[in-house]
Amino acid sequence: MADSDRKERILIVDDTPDTLEVLQRNLTSQGYRTFIASHAAEAIKILETAPMDLVITDFKMPEVSGLDLIRHVRENFRDTEVMMITGYPSVEGAVEAVKKGAEEYLVKPFTDEELLSAVGRTLGKLRLRRITKAPPPGRASAPYGFIGESEAMARVRDSIAKVASTSATVLIAGESGTGKELAARAIHYNSPRASAPFVPVNCGAIPNELLESELFGHIKGAFTGAIETRAGFFQTADGGSIFLDEISETSLSMQVKLLRVLQEKEVCMVGSSRLRKVDVRILVSTNKDLFNLVKKGAFREDLFFRINVITIDLPPLRERGNDILLLIRHFAAKFAEDSGKSQPQFSEEALQILQHYHWPGNIRELENVIQRLVLMTEGHLIAVPDLPSLMRFSALRETGLHRTLTEVEAEYIRNVLASVDGNKTRAAQILGIDRKTLREKLQKMKKPA
């Protein structure tokens, strides 16, 4: 849901009619639902009959002050935020307002921009608290296994629903760790082929000289070590679906063979001249720009157009807004249950850092970080000091434009390795390269300039 569609309810309390009118007009123009009260007693009656997201109260009012109203709201309406405004500013007043529970403290006269910014910050913290304190999402609230309520994920689910019932080839594009295999499984298990095999193949993890045998099978004696005839992944997936993960890692010669499978629906086992028909739906994925690879001659144009019938783009985690908070809650509950611990809570400051981190490894990296936090953090609260140093200091890191591309790449690789505790396999997955390439880059980083 977009911010403009939220319609949060705001109660404005001030004994000055002109102030009430100005605040109500400004907030209503931004799509908020506003209510007004000229004194605290009237405000309390409204709060008891209608739930409010935010109370904006004046400091000095007759009979019951704004501070008393703040205390009443905090004691009786835990799911309501509070802001204070005043024309009589003082350090003591500000401190007291914050101690009583006011999230923001504005001094009159303030600009429209200052008001709206303060309201936005306050309501943002309220949304954050509501998301993280709600029960973890169940399967019913995570269609196709995708947890998230962002518009980007709604589009992904809609695309899956449309293509699942067809037999069309689907290209699933997205950065490493965005859930491409999950999308492929969702398509298969919601298709007429659901009762038949789903066979995932990581094209980048199989050496090129072995890939043909793995995909199409081989007969006994076809090559050294072929001591028996063995079917390949395409035969195993007959009647079902095969998922070719990271198809961009295949060689041009292998791409020719894949093109034949797509066009003719038949395979030839290594060492045999006999063609075998297969009934397989092909789903492919990539974390690279295939069209750009075609222009460079690194990927066959005819294969590109053959697999690019329907494309589903999975958004990176940094573009999914509050979905990050939902995923944090989900993973925290999951790993707490797995380890026999109670589900931890996160401080607001820690959540803000996690939400605004750039997540180069996307959901895979987030899952890894939350697992480590659940297992390694003592107590029930995960705070900023518990977060990986990479995240805690990312905002303070030097980001000047005086560094070379080699220096920037080296720093990025070190950061990714740090985020996965030095696991080179996981780091290579996040970086979108194979382990051999990662080793070569690490060797270059060790050499003196």
Image (cartoon, grey):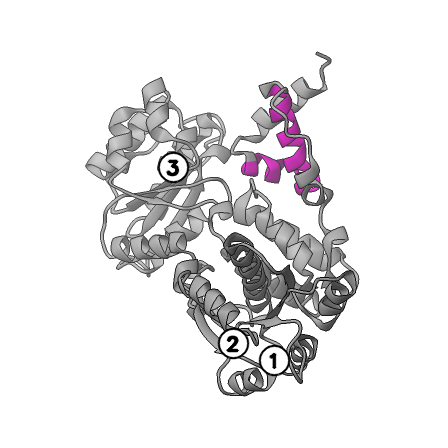
Measured Cα–Cα span from mark 1 to mark 3? 61 Å
The image shows residue 21, relative to residue 116, as above or below, that is below
Q: Residue at x 61, y 19 (%)?
A: 406
| Label 2 CA crowd tier, 10 Å (few <14, some 14–19, many 20+) | many
Closer to the N terminus: mark 1 or mark 3?
Answer: 1
Closer to the N terminus: mark 2 or mark 3?
Answer: 2
Q: How many marks?
A: 3
Nearer to me, 393 or 206: 393
Residue at numbered disc 2: 52
Mark in front: 1 vs 3:
1
Q: Residue furthest top?
A: 449
Q: Residue 214 location, x and y as percent? A: 42, 36
- Point out the image quarter for the N terminus: bottom left
Residue 185 in sight: no
Q: Amino acid at mark 1?
A: Phe
Residue at numbered disc 3: 215
Q: Amino acid at mark 2?
A: Met
The image shows residue 300, relative to residue 118, as above or below, that is above
